[in-house]
Amino acid sequence: MAERPPTKEAPPFGKRLAAVRKKHGLSQRELSERMETTREIIDYYERRAVNPSLSFIERAAESLDVSVAELLGSDSGITRKRPGPEPQLFRRLDQIRQLQRKEQEFVIRFLDTVLERAGKT
């Protein structure tokens, strides 16, 4: 669903939150599901919240697998991500994100079948 463009510039935390979320290939809705909140709350923190709560920052950092310092813009380059080239699985996921919705759904059904047979679901 297309969102209405913001009428004023987002606060610094909101810009960082949106950038990290997009870097992980997540929509606002997907992040909200990870954080067990609503998409509207994510939208609020990305576009309008000038002074986010520590609780929200910690939950967002955990959900995005980044440090609180990174979300606050004071990270010295230390992240939880392993050094080295991006794993093949992540490259494939990026390619899948570029597919049309029907093709994505086919891939998801296939993966669900494989995981079910392996007893992982």
Image: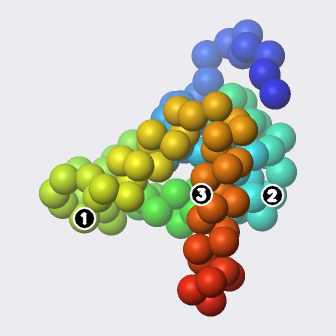
The residue closer to the viewer here, 67 or 54, is 67
Q: Give the distance between the C-alpha atoms of the residues marked 1 and 3, in whole angstroms.
A: 20 Å
Image side of residue 88 versus residue 118, left or right: left
Which secondary structure, mark 1? loop
Instruction: Locate the N terminus and report the quarter of the image it occupies.
Output: top right
Is residue 61 positioned above or below 95 on the image? below
- Among all residues in the image, which is located at the extreme bottom? 119
Q: Give the distance between the C-alpha atoms of the residues marked 1 and 2, in whole angstroms.
A: 28 Å
Is residue 118 positioned above or below 37 on the image? below
Is residue 11 positioned above or below 111 on the image? above
Q: What residue is shown with label 3?
A: 60
Can residue 79 be seen in this snapshot?
no
Identity of the residue drawn at 38% across and 58% down: 89
Query: Mark 2 or mark 3: which comes first in sequence?
Result: 2
Identity of the residue drawn at 62% across and 89% down: 119
Kind of residue at badge 2:
Thr
Q: What residue is shown with label 2?
A: 37
Image side of residue 27 versus residue 62, left or right: right
Question: 10 Å neighbourhood of mark 2: few (<14), some, or many (≥20)?
Answer: few
Query: Mark 1 or mark 3: which comes first in sequence?
Result: 3
Kind of residue at badge 3:
Ala
Which secondary structure, mark 3? helix
Q: Give the distance between the C-alpha atoms of the residues marked 2 and 3, in whole angstroms.
A: 11 Å
Kind of residue at badge 1:
Arg
Identity of the residue drawn at 59% across and 74% down: 114
